[in-house]
Image (cartoon, rainbow, N blue to C red):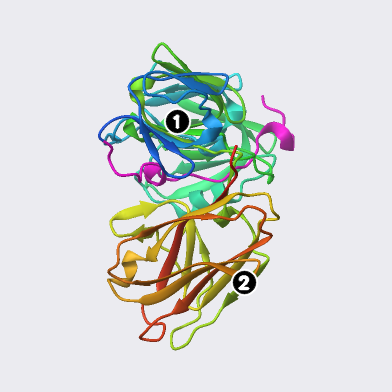
Amino acid sequence: MRPTLPHCCLAVWVVLTAAAFSQAPVSLGPQLILLDGAAVPFQSLEIAAGKLSGDGVPAGLTLDDLRRIDVAPPTAAAAPAAVIELRGGGMLMAKGLTLADDKCRIEWSVAEPLTLPIDVVRAIRLEPATASPEFIKALQTPSAELDRIFLKDEMGKLSSVTGLIESLSAEQLIFETGGQKRAVPRSRLFGIVLAQPAAADPPAKCLLALSGGSLLAAASLALAGGTATLSLAGGGKADVPWSAVSSVTLRSSRVAFLSDVKPTAEEQTALVTLARAAQRDKNVMGKPLVLGTKTFDKGLGVHARSSLTFAAEGKWDTLAATIGLDAAAGGKGDCVFTVLADGQNLFTRRMKGNDPPHELNLSIAGKGQITLLVEPGEGLDLGDLADWCDVRFIKNR
């Protein structure tokens, strides 16, 4: 039986869908996406100790030089029998699973069954197509010491109880609650939120999007002979056929997304519309960031007039972003985007709702404070849903 110590599991941010990691346009073939957004096609790839090699791969390239590896278009996901949330943002679409001896054995369509430490598992949902606000709330605010078990009665009504999971077989769930051991038929189990403390894991170095919609978060990635070997976030290892990988999203030490950074100063001033706070990784309406037909998983959504200042502290060389009026504005809006560095104007561009997105790549070497300013153009501030998509600081080698 697992001990009820807080260090058994670590809470991490939750990925409820793989969509955010497959938003890039379908490519004509495999390609490496560099930190500045440039795409480098390749024909073959090997990865060892963080270094890349292969046909078409530039010499000296490392995983820290990349934002993403696009391998193949994502495939449609078949309805899974269970969805398993893992630490670090992993999510497995499972055909079956069992729990025993503090291990979780997962059957899936990607490769051979995985056997993972149960401390890597955040939650198990056996009816993923059924909505449950109570389950989502428990996943967002898990107990540090006790598992929460969601059960169904004969009418399908959900209830929950706290305890410690001992095992889950094809026939029944066994757990301890209130000092008593209890067994219930597996058919009555809706899901489990595993105990995990409030502290979050550091972001995963790699996030692999796999065929069928599964995600695996990894602290390290090696690739040889068509097999990707992962050290999973939170513990455990997995071997995955490279042919099952759609893309790899990478977190580089040379990049800081501004949606992950707290501004040193922030100002939002409405003219004739309702005042709205800036949004992280969403447009100002709280919806996905969309410029034209492309959806972005990172960025800042604001409403003119908006001013956001960030500390660069002379540590970064480049500010990069894709800017424009969000598709939710329906072609309306008229804004002036400005970037200031230590109060000096680096960039100004007026953009209207029907204008195509604009790629921004500015030198900020030695600069201390960077301000992202959006001011209304004509028509006051009506429809001025401005997006700083993928806005990030980049450090050169």
Residue holding disc 1: 185
Decide if residue 293 is on the left or right side of residue 35: left
Give the structural element (helix, strand or loop) at label 1. strand
Mark yes or no: residue 27 visible: yes
Whether residue 40 appears in magenta in the rendering, the answer is no
Image spot of residue 78 (x, y percent): 28, 34
The span from disc 1 to disc 2 (Cα, nearest Å) is: 54 Å
Give the structural element (helix, strand or loop) at label 2. strand
- Location of the C terminus by quadrant is top right
Q: Is residue 307 above or below residue 153?
A: below
Residue range (magenta): 1-27
Q: Is residue 5 above or below residue 138?
A: above
Q: Is residue 219 above or below residue 161?
A: above
| Camera-nearest residue between 298 and 49 | 49
Which residue is found at the position 54% from the left and 39% from the top? 251
| Camera-nearest residue between 127 and 358 | 358
Residue holding disc 2: 266
| Camera-nearest residue between 218 and 190 | 218
Amino acid type of disc 1? Pro
* Mark 1 or mark 2, whichever is nearer to me: 2
Image spot of residue 99 (x, y percent): 52, 23
Quadrant position of residue 211: top left
